[in-house]
Image (tube, rainbow, N blue to C red):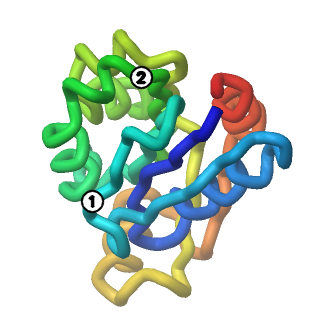
Amino acid sequence: MKTAIIYISKNGATEKVAGMLQKSNKTKDIEAFNLKEKKHIDLHNYQNIIIGSPIYAGKIMNPVKRFIDDNMVQLLNMNVSLFICCMDDNRADEELQNAYPELLRKHALFCEHVGGEFNFKRMNFVERTIVKKISGVKNSLQKFNFGKISALADSI
């Protein structure tokens, strides 16, 4: 069964999770698509779909939202798993509930936040300043939940 990982990544965390999922089981036919590079994906070639996005200002990124809106009917007839990358553990469940449409969340085989990272090397000055002020983190920090990433890989 072919699987498509459809994601967007601003500073690299979601892309890292997509890479981990792609490498998780060499016997599965898994392709990853970054919506920054490929806007239209023919879902007819896949049985399983994994969708991932980072959370910024409490929302998933617009290309992922548009992809879901444009493909909702088809997604509801497929095996779908959803994830977000989020660094705020206290708000992660709330962020997840707000990230994806309720109908899609209820249909999904897996719907979780999988941690994330603050990669200061990939952030611009304004982003670094905001992250430092809001989170109190002064240096790059990685906080992936490898147990949830493994469970996500097992869901397909």
For label 1, the residue is 40
Quadrant in the picture for residue 70:
top left
In the depicted structure, whether residue 52 falls above or below residue 91: below
**Is there CB contact under 8 Å for labels 1 and 2?**
no
Extreme residue toward the right, this view: 26
Q: Residue at x 69, y 46 (%)?
A: 29
Residue toward you, 91 or 8:
8
Extreme residue toward the top, this view: 106
Residue toward you, 19 or 156:
156
Q: Residue at x 69, y 52 (%)?
A: 22
Residue toward you, 72 or 44:
44
Report, in whole angstroms, how far the alpha carbon at label 1 lies from the one at label 2. Answer: 17 Å
Quadrant position of the N terminus in the picture: top right
Give amino acid for label 1. Answer: His
Query: Could you say whether the residue bearing mark 2 is in a helix, strand or loop?
Result: loop
Q: Residue at x 37, y 30 (%)?
A: 96
Query: Could you say whether the residue bearing mark 1 is in a helix, strand or loop?
Result: loop
Left or right: residue 55 versus residue 149 is left
Q: Position of residue 65 (x, y in %)?
A: 21, 46
Q: Position of residue 18 (x, y in %)?
A: 60, 54
Left or right: residue 79 versus residue 10 is right
Left or right: residue 120 versus residue 61 is right
**Mark 1 crowd level (few <14, some 14–19, many ≥20, 10 Å Cα):** few
Quadrant in the picture for residue 152:
top right
Q: Position of residue 42 (x, y in %)?
A: 34, 50
Q: Residue at x 43, y 65 (%)?
A: 34
Give amino acid for label 2. Answer: Met
**Mark 2 crowd level (few <14, some 14–19, many ≥20, 10 Å Cα):** some
In the depicted structure, whether residue 134 falls above or below residue 120: above
- Of labels 1 and 2, earlier in sequence is 1
Residue 20's tag is none
For label 2, the residue is 78
